[in-house]
Image (spheres, helix red, strand yellow):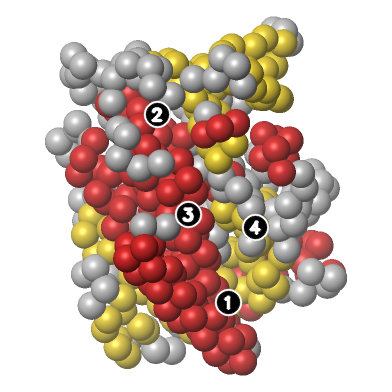
Amino acid sequence: MNKERREVVVIGGSIAGLMHGIMVKDLGHNVRILEQYSSSIRPSHAAGMGTGPKGHEFFNTYDRILESCTYDCPGICLLDEDSKTKRLLNTPMHFTSWDALYFRLRSNFDGLISDYCPHSPVPEDNGGKAVFELGKLVTEVSYSTTEGIVTVQFEDLVNGQTRSIQADLVIDASGAHSIIQRQLVGHIEQPYSGYVAWRGLVSENTVSEATRLLFKDRFYVFSTGNSYVVGYAVPNDQGSLKPGERFLNWVWYYTLDEESEAFSRALTDTSGHTHRSTVPVGEMDPKAWSDLKADAATALNPSFLELVNATQQPFLATIRDGASPRGSFFDGHLVLVGEALRLLRPHTGMSANQAAVHCFALRKVLLGQMSMEDWEVEVQQWGQRAALLSKTVGFYNLGPKSSFLVTLIKYLMVLASQRITRLWRLVTGY
């Protein structure tokens, strides 16, 4: 790991993979991203997302495009059953969409041209080489202890050939279903939380003026008692954040028994295939969607009901937990990052933020400012806090209250324990 210019392979070309690729390239190393998907122009994820404070810092540090793909949200607005403001919470946040974030990162990594980024930023003279390879399914990794080299084996999905390449460092950012994670640590349980997230995007110009004005700039929340729904504005499909041109993103966290007929129906798509985790955009069974809209008619306030009824292509994701017991392997020559390391519940919008936390910590390792052992401690402790905080928010809104109180106490105990540990290490040097 002490070479002046390293050869780095990133497995997975989504948000976490691209963040790490940009950071490593910026340090002057050569980066090759291996992405399973066969096209750079991804189908729309139809999903909004927050960047979190570290994600916002990442863009301030690395984004070389002048126009912002995020906007500043002053905080949370709690709505009542009449869509009136019940309470305002000043908790600044930054929002965008998955699509806008992906294409912005691609533009910064390898100069991809898209509707979101029609012009590539000027390449930096001191950066490393950036290569983004499509249709490459990584199947196995191995390590030479004598040479300090990782061999990455992958299947070329275009021609069916099996190939391999070598790297000084491998960053696995292939998500919660990582093949490499499973090879290194075995099967990791991802238990179902007991609820799902129904989601959708609606163009601002298709809703009433009252709803358009309501969803102006805050993060809006309405609780039904045993479920809750959130909504906020995001860039449209060309990246515009201009009021009147944006999309409105909504997410309805909805309790659903895993053994129920309703759960099975919700996870079965139009072709009859039953998914485990996500029903993609455009594949929702009309009967399941009709059932949800019927429930929305009695459960939601007028503004959120209008968003649900105006949604043309909803999708669904089950909410699950999961974490790898380790993040660093092969003497620090391979790391798991993003959801390959920890799957977080989405209540606090920490997916992009987690990727940035991992990214900035790894940057310190590559600069010699942190050991890989300390990287492991930092990312695992952060992940433990983030997981408990997100669960706490979820239980607060969904219940039961006993679970909320237990999880809140666990979160506070972890905070105290980690602070004591950091103080002990500072004082003793261990």
Q: Quadrant of residue 307?
A: bottom left
- In the rendered view, tell whether residue 7 sits above or below residue 298: above
Q: Earlier in the sequence, mark 1 or mark 4?
A: 1
Q: Is mark 4 on a helix, strand or loop?
A: strand
Q: Which of marks 2 and 4 is nearer the N terminus?
A: 2
Residue 416 in view (yes/no): yes
The residue closer to the viewer here, 301 or 92, is 92
Q: Is residue 198 left or right of residue 379?
A: right
Q: Nearer the viewer, mark 3 or mark 2?
A: 3
Location of mark 4 (residue): 322
Circle on res. 296: 1
- Residue 373, horizontal then vertical, whole percent: 48, 45
Q: Nearer the viewer, mark 4 or mark 3?
A: 3
What's the distance in space between the residues labelled 4 and 3, CA to CA?
Answer: 18 Å
- Amino acid type of the residue tagged 2 in the rendering: Gly
- Residue 384, horizontal then vertical, whole percent: 52, 64
Location of mark 3 (residue): 377
